[in-house]
Image (cartoon, rainbow, N blue to C red):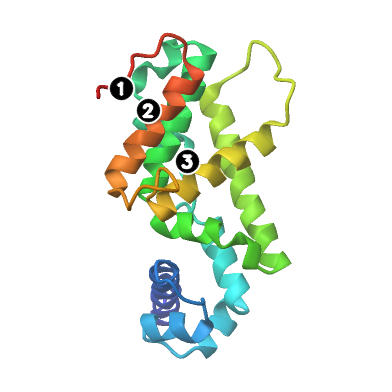
């Protein structure tokens, strides 16, 4: 790889890292803020990505945006193949909670969807579609086809997880909860709702 190509790759990486850092700030996302954080000229955002929507699209296309099948399989445990379809689904969604906990920038980006331009929404939709396919691969062939829209159900579930992880509130009345605690509460709630005879959570 030439020196110029290496420099371009470093700048590309720095801008993606800067974007993720800026997503964690409670302020409007701008090219200027991302470029300043990456310590590069903002013109490079337009040269390499065509602007902020392109930069966001590049993040959505990266492996860092959503967990892949291998990561989910590791989080679910090697014994997932011997579980029933219902148990595999629950384990997979619980693994998704853990994976999103590790991706605060993804959570914040998904929470900002209503303010995103259409081209960015299309890129994010592609990222979510890939995520759904990863779950299908891990979940395996269903014994009975569901009589509901699986993609819509997945998007609703991920939206709810992001809302809880992003706000760190498990109700409208409680104060902020530690990220690890809210993640565990979500995991327990999913199991309790979807599995019969789920042990009650200790008081």
Give the residue displayed 50% in from the left and 19% down from the top.
Answer: 194
Residue 142: percent from the left, percent from the top? 63, 16
The residue depicted at 43 percent of the width and 22 percent of the height is 191
SS assignment at label 2: helix
Residue 154 relative to residue 63: left or right: right
Task: Mark 1 vs mark 3: give the one in front.
Answer: 1
Residue 166 picture quarter: bottom left
On the image, which quarter does residue 36 sit in? bottom left
- Marks 3 and 2, how far apart at CA: 22 Å
Crowd rating for badge 2 (residues with CA inside 10 Å; few <14, some 14–19, many 20+): some
Q: Where does the image place residue 120, in percent across and percent down from the top left?
A: 65, 65
| Residue at the image position 56 percent from the left and 42 percent from the top | 131
Give SS at disc 3: loop
Q: Are marks 3 and 2 in contact (CB under 8 Å)?
A: no
Alpha-carbon span between mark 2 and mark 1: 8 Å
Identify residue for label 2: 188
User: CA–CA distance between discs 1 and 3?
Assistant: 30 Å
User: Which residue is at the far left?
Assistant: 203
Tag 1: Cα neighbours inside 10 Å, few (<14), some, or many (≥20)? few
Q: Look at mark 3 in the image and give the residue it sits on.
A: 68
Indicate the position of residue 93 as horizontal and vertical percent values.
47, 31
Asked whether disc 1 touches disc 3, contact meaning CB atoms under 8 Å apart, the reply is: no
SS category of the residue bearing label 1? loop
Q: On the image, numbered disc 1 is attached to which residue?
A: 201
Q: Quick one: 33 or 201, which is closer to the camera? A: 201
Determine whether 201 is above or below 104 in the image.
above
Q: Are marks 2 and 1 in contact (CB under 8 Å)?
A: yes
């Amino acid at each position: 790889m030439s020196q110029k190509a290496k420099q371009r790759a470093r700048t590309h990486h720095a801008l993606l890292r800067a974007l993720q850092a800026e997503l964690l700030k409670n302020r409007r996302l701008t090219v200027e803020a991302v470029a300043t954080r990456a310590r590069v000229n903002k013109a490079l955002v337009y040269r390499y990505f065509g602007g902020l929507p392109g930069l966001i699209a590049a993040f959505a296309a990266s492996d860092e945006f959503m967990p892949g099948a291998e990561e989910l399989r590791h989080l679910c445990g090697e014994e997932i193949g011997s579980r029933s379809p219902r148990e595999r689904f629950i384990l997979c969604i619980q693994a998704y909670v853990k994976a999103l906990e590790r991706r605060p920038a993804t959570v914040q980006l998904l929470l900002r969807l209503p303010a995103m331009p259409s081209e960015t929404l299309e890129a994010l939709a592609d990222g979510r579609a890939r995520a759904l396919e990863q779950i299908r691969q891990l979940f395996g062939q269903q014994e009975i086809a569901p009589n509901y829209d699986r993609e819509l159900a997945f998007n609703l579930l991920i939206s709810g997880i992001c809302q809880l992880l992003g706000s760190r509130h498990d109700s409208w009345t409680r104060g902020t909860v530690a990220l690890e605690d809210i993640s565990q509460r979500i995991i327990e709630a999913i199991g309790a709702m979807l599995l019969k005879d789920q042990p009650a959570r200790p008081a």
